[in-house]
C-alpha cells in the first residue's frame, strides 16, 4: 500500500498482522500494523477473542455464584478479584467486616499482588529474551501456589472470598509458610534486579520505548502501576483507603517517563512494598471471627443449623435463594494488581443480580496501545505489550 | 487535553467515605444550579444525577473543565437494560457514566442518561475522553445503543457477523452465532493512517485468503 | 523394543553381539514420534498460566520429550488448546489446525476447551471438538500441571499404537492411488 506522508514523501507500507495467536500476545489479542521498513506508522488493535460472556452468565446465578466467574477475570491474581467483588456487594449491604477478616484480606490481596507482578515481569523479560528471569521467578511463585493450595484448595482459581467474610480461616503454620515465601521472593527479586539493573540490552530495549504522557494516560483512564509509571502519584489504597490501608506503612512507587522500563520497574518495586505490607499484616493477625454474624449474608454455624429451626431456614434461604442484595445501583472499586478494578452492581432486590459490570483496568491500557507503539519498531511493540500486562480474561470478559 | 494545572506528582490527602458523599452532594448541587436534572432514585448509596440527553456533552465538559471539580478521568460507561425491572417506569435503557478526579481524592461522580427503545441514540464523548471510544463501542455491541458522532461505531467484543445485542434481557444466553472468517480490519487501519496525517494513494489490497482456500492448500 | 528382539529369528545371545537391531518400522517411527512431541501452545486463558508453571523448573515438561515450544503450526505436531475458544477465535483455530502437517495430535486442556466449561453462553464454542478432532481431553479448571503430564503420557501411549504404513495406505486410497510397486 502506498501513502503520502505529511511532508509529501511517498512511502510504501507493508501491512502486518500480529496475533491473535502469537507468542508475544499473552492470550489472544490482535494488532494490525502498517510498517515502513520496521517502523510502525499506524497500528490498530482488536480485542474480543476471549469474550466469554461474563456479564450475561452472572445474571443467571446468585451473587455467591458470581465468585468463580470473578476468579477467571484476572487469573494471575484471582483472590484480588474475589475480594473486589465481595467488597462491592458488602458496600451495598453497608456491613462492616470483622477485624481479622480485614487483616486477612489485606494479607491475601498483597500476597496475590506479589504473584501477579512476578508473572508480569517474568513474562515481559522472557519476551525480551531474558529467559533466566522467568526461571528465577517461578521458583517462589510455585511456593506461593503451594500456600494457596493449602489455604484455599485450588492453585489458580481460588474463590477464596465470601460475601461478608472469607471461605475459611488460615491453617496451622500459615504464617511461617508465608514468611518463608517472602524471604525467597525477596531473594529472587534482587537476583533478577541485579540481572537487569545495568544490563545494556535490557536498558536499550526498554528505556524511552513506548512513552506516554500523564495527560494522555489519564484521558485513556489508566490506573494502577502503568499510570504511576508516568509519574502520577495516585493509588486507591492511599487516596480512598479501604480495609484500613491508611494504617499500613508503605510507599507508592512512581516512575518519571512512562516508558516500558518505568512500567516494569514500578512493578518490581511495588512487589517489594507488598512484601512489607504482608509482613505488617502477619504481625496484626489476631484470633477472632472471620465472617460477620449477619443473617442476611452469612450462614449460621453448623451446630445451630442442626438444632435450631430458624437457623436451618436461614441456611436454606441463603443457599437456595442466595444473598438478597437491597435494590439499587452501586459502584465500588479497589486497587488490583493492574489498577482500579471496580464492580458496578444493579440489584432488583432478589437473589440474582440484575446486571454486573466489571471495570477492567486492562481495557483502558490496551485502548491506548496504538499511541505507545506508533513511531517505534515492531520488536519494541512486543516489549511494550508485555509491560502493560494485558490479561485477556479481564480485557474481554 | 486540559490539565487545569494539577500537579500529578504530588500525593493526595486521603479521603474518607464522608468526604466522598460530601463531594458528590456539592457536585450535584452545582450541576443542579446550571442544568435541569433529577436525582437518580436507584443510586441509594450515592448522590447521582440523571441528565437530559441533549445536555450530556455540555455537563461532562463542565465537570471536566471546572477547577473546583476536575473530573478528568472517565472510569467507565455502563449500559443497563431495565426490561421488566421491578417497579421500573420510563425508558427501557440507561447509560451510566462514572467519573473520577485526579485532583481531589474524594471526587467520584455518576451520571445517568435514560434512553428510549424507539430512539437509541446518545451523544458521544470521544472528543472529551479518549477511552470513550472503546467504552462506547462496547455499549453499542452489547446493548445496541448508538453514540452520535462516534468515528468508528463497530462492535468491540463480539465478531462482526454477530446479529443482535447479547446483553439485552430478551437475548437468549445460549443463542450462538458462528463466524465464517475474521474481520480484515483494513478499513480501521486506513482510518488510523489518515488520522496520523498520511494520505492513501492506493487502497490496501485484501490479501487474506478465504478459509476454504487455506484448507484446500494444506491438504496433501 | 525388547519384545521384537525376543521374537527375532537370531538367537538372543548372538543378537546381543550383533552390530544391528531388528524391529518393525512402526515401532521405530512411533518411538521417535512419541518422544519428540513439539507442542504449539494455543494459549487463550487461565490454563496457559498453568502451562507456564509446567514449563518452569518444578514440573519441567521437557522431560517428556516436549522440549521445544514451537510458535508456528508448520513446525509442530502437538496442538495444545489451553483456554476458552470463542466463536471469534474459531476460524483461527481451524486455520492453525489445517496448517499443521501430519502427523498431528491435539490435546484439549481444561473444561473450557473440552466442553465450554461453565461459560454456556452466546459466544463460547461448547467444546473444540466442534471444530477440530481431539486426541486427549484434560479435565480441570484449570488442570494441575500433573494432569498435563498425564495427558502427554497418554498421548505417547496412543501414538505407540498407531501404524505408520496403514496410515499411509489409507491416505493413498483416499486420493484414489495405489501403493507404489
Image: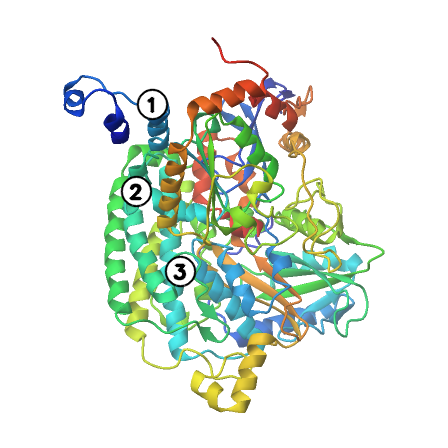
Label 2 marks a residue whose chain is: C
Q: Quadrant of residue B44?
A: bottom right
Residue under numbered circle 1 = C24
- Residue A75 in the image: state x and y as whole percent: 46, 54
- State how far apart marks 3 and 2 are (Cα): 20 Å
Label 3 marks a residue whose chain is: A
Residue under numbered circle 3 = A154
Check if mark 1's residue and mark 3's residue have beta carbons within 8 Å. no
Give the side of residue B92 with respect to residue A279, left or right: right
Residue A74 versus residue A123 in the image, above or below: below
- Residue C109 in the image: state x and y as whole percent: 46, 45
Of residue B11 and residue C115, the one placed in the foreground of this image is C115
Residue under numbered circle 2 = C60
Q: Quadrant of residue C128?
A: top right
List the single residue furthest toward the right: B118
Q: Secondary structure at mark 3?
A: loop
Amino acid at each position: 500500500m502506498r501513502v503520502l506522508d505529511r511532508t509529501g514523501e511517498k512511502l510504501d507500507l507493508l501491512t502486518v498482522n500480529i496475533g491473535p495467536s502469537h507468542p508475544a500476545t499473552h492470550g489472544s489479542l490482535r494488532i494490525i500494523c502498517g510498517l515502513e521498513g520496521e517502523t510502525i506508522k499506524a497500528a490498530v488493535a482488536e480485542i474480543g477473542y476471549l469474550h466469554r460472556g461474563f456479564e450475561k452468565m452472572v445474571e443467571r446465578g446468585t451473587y455467591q455464584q458470581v465468585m468463580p466467574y470473578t476468579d477467571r477475570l484476572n487469573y494471575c491474581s484471582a483472590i484480588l478479584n474475589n475480594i473486589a467483588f465481595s467488597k462491592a456487594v458488602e458496600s451495598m449491604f453497608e456491613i462492616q467486616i470483622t477485624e481479622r477478616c480485614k487483616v486477612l484480606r489485606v494479607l491475601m490481596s498483597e500476597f496475590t499482588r506479589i504473584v501477579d507482578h512476578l508473572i508480569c515481569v517474568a513474562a515481559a523479560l522472557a519476551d525480551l529474551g531474558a529467559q533466566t528471569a522467568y526461571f528465577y521467578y517461578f521458583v517462589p511463585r510455585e511456593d506461593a501456589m503451594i500456600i494457596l493450595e493449602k489455604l484455599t484448595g485450588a492453585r489458580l482459581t481460588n474463590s477464596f472470598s465470601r460475601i461478608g467474610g472469607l471461605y475459611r480461616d488460615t491453617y496451622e503454620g500459615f504464617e511461617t509458610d508465608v514468611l518463608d515465601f517472602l524471604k525467597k521472593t525477596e531473594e529472587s527479586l534482587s537476583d533478577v534486579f541485579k540481572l537487569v539493573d545495568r544490563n545494556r540490552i535490557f536498558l536499550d530495549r526498554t528505556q524511552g520505548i513506548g512513552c506516554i504522557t500523564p495527560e494522555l494516560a489519564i484521558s485513556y483512564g489508566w490506573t494502577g502501576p502503568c499510570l504511576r509509571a508516568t509519574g502520577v502519584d495516585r493509588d486507591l489504597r492511599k487516596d480512598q483507603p479501604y480495609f484500613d490501608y491508611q494504617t499500613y506503612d508503605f510507599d507508592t512507587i512512581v516512575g518519571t517517563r512512562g516508558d516500558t522500563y518505568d512500567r516494569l520497574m514500578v512493578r518490581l518495586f511495588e512487589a517489594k512494598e507488598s512484601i512489607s505490607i504482608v509482613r505488617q499484616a502477619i504481625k496484626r493477625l489476631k484470633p477472632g471471627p472471620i465472617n460477620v454474624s449477619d443473617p442476611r449474608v452469612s450462614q449460621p454455624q453448623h451446630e445451630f443449623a442442626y438444632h435450631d429451626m430458624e437457623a436451618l431456614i436461614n441456611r436454606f434461604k441463603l443457599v437456595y435463594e442466595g444473598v438478597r442484595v437491597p435494590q439499587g445501583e452501586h459502584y465500588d472499586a479497589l486497587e488490583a494488581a493492574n489498577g482500579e478494578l471496580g464492580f458496578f452492581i444493579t440489584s432488583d432486590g432478589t437473589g440474582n443480580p440484575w446486571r454486573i459490570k466489571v471495570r477492567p483496568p486492562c481495557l483502558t491500557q490496551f485502548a491506548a496501545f496504538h499511541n505507545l507503539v506508533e513511531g517505534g519498531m515492531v520488536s519494541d511493540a512486543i516489549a511494550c505489550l508485555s509491560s502493560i500486562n494485558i490479561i485477556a480474561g479481564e480485557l474481554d470478559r | 487535553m486540559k490539565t487545569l494545572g494539577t500537579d500529578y506528582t504530588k500525593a493526595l490527602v486521603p479521603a474518607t467515605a464522608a468526604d466522598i458523599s460530601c463531594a458528590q452532594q456539592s457536585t450535584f448541587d452545582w450541576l443542579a444550579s446550571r442544568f435541569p436534572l433529577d436525582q437518580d432514585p436507584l443510586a441509594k448509596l450515592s448522590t447521582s444525577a440523571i441528565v437530559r440527553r441533549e445536555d450530556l456533552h455540555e455537563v461532562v465538559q463542565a465537570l471536566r473543565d471546572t477547577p473546583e471539580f476536575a473530573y478528568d478521568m472517565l472510569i467507565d460507561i455502563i449500559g443497563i437494560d431495565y426490561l421488566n425491572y421491578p417497579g421500573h417506569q420510563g425508558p427501557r435503557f440507561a447509560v451510566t457514566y462514572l467519573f473520577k478526579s485526579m485532583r481531589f481524592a474524594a471526587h467520584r461522580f455518576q451520571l445517568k442518561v435514560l434512553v428510549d427503545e424507539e430512539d437509541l441514540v446518545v451523544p458521544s464523548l470521544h472528543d472529551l475522553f479518549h477511552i470513550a471510544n472503546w467504552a462506547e463501542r462496547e455499549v453499542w455491541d452489547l446493548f445496541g445503543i448508538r453514540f452520535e458522532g462516534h468515528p468508528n461505531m463497530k462492535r468491540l467484543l463480539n465478531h462482526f457477523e454477530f446479529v443482535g445485542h447479547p446483553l439485552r434481557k430478551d437475548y437468549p444466553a445460549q443463542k450462538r452465532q458462528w463466524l465464517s472468517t475474521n474481520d480484515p480490519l483494513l478499513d480501521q487501519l486506513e482510518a488510523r493512517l489518515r488520522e496520523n496525517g498520511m494520505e492513501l494513494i492506493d487502497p490496501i489490497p485484501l490479501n487474506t485468503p478465504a478459509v476454504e482456500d487455506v484448507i484446500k492448500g494444506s491438504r496433501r | 523394543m525388547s519384545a521384537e528382539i525376543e521374537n527375532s529369528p537370531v538367537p538372543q545371545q548372538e543378537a546381543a553381539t550383533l552390530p544391528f537391531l531388528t524391529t518393525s518400522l512402526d515401532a521405530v517411527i512411533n518411538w521417535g514420534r512419541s518422544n519428540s512431541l513439539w507442542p504449539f501452545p494455543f494459549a487463550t486463558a487461565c490454563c496457559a498460566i498453568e502451562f507456564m508453571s509446567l514449563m518452569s523448573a518444578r514440573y519441567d515438561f521437557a522431560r517428556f520429550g516436549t522440549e521445544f515450544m514451537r510458535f508456528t503450526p508448520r513446525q509442530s505436531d502437538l496442538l495444545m488448546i489451553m483456554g476458552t475458544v470463542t466463536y471469534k477465535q474459531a476460524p483461527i483455530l481451524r486455520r492453525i489446525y489445517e496448517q499443521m502437517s501430519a502427523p498431528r495430535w491435539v490435546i484439549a486442556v481444561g473444561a473450557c476447551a473440552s466442553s465450554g466449561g461453565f461459560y454456556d453462553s452466546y459466544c463460547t464454542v461448547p467444546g473444540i471438538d466442534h471444530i477440530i478432532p481431539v486426541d486427549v481431553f484434560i479435565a480441570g479448571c484449570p488442570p494441575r500441571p500433573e494432569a498435563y503430564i498425564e495427558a502427554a503420557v497418554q498421548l505417547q501411549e496412543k501414538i505407540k499404537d498407531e501404524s505408520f504404513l496403514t496410515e499411509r495406505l489409507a491416505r493413498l486410497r483416499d486420493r484414489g492411488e495405489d501403493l507404489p510397486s
